[in-house]
Image (cartoon, rainbow, N blue to C red):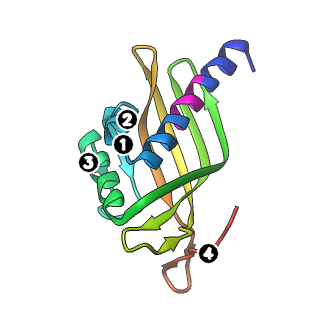
Amino acid sequence: MTTQSVTEEARIRGQIDKLIAGLQAKDLDTLAQLYTPDVLSFDIEPPLQHAGRAAKLQNWSKVFEFFDTVTYELRDLSFTVGADIAFGHAFGRLSGTLRNGQPTAGMWVRATFGMRKIDDAWLIAHDQVSVPLDITTGKGVLDLEP
């Protein structure tokens, strides 16, 4: 790995750290700065895709309506970095305290990030969140841990 790719990966990880901080602060303005205008998100909830920054922020806004406090963590985050495109994957978990005061541990999901370097800033151009599927029941498996 070259010194430049190590530096670029550190910059990308800094953006992901901002994403985590923005989620935990429930700060849509911070989150808006981290996505490309044309971000395409394959999020956990319907529909199959959410196109554009406004749609992605609307998803986060819905999440924030349910939570009084938000904790977001990533495990095993790994990136492959090119000159202006990077791909990453991790396990993520959104947890916290619901508006009714009930704590929730959330569930672990698989997360991927497609990043683009635009005007010297790494932005999320694509993300996908998924859960494993039990093929025999057709239901998501929600109790797995990394």
Q: Earlier in the sequence, mark 2 or mark 3?
A: 2
- Where residue 55 is drawn, which disc sits there? 3
Could you tell me which residue is drawn at 55 percent across and 79 percent down? 135
Q: Is residue 123 left or right of residue 132?
A: left
Could you tell me which residue is drawn at 43 percent across and 45 percent down? 25
- Where residue 30 is drawn, which disc sits there? 2
Q: Earlier in the sequence, mark 3 or mark 1?
A: 1
Q: Quadrant of the N terminus?
A: top right
Between the C-alphas of marks 4 and 3, the distance is 28 Å
Q: Earlier in the sequence, mark 2 or mark 4?
A: 2
* Neighbourhood count class around disc 1 (C-alpha, 10 Å): few under 14, some 14–19, many 20 upward: some
Secondary structure under tag 1 reads loop
Kindly report the secondary structure that dominates the magenta region of the rendered protein.
helix
Query: Of the residues shown, which amino acid type is indicated by label 2?
Result: Thr
Could you tell me which residue is drawn at 57 percent across and 69 percent down? 105
Which residue in the structure is indicated by mark 1?
A: 27
Residue lying farthest to the bottom in this orientation: 137
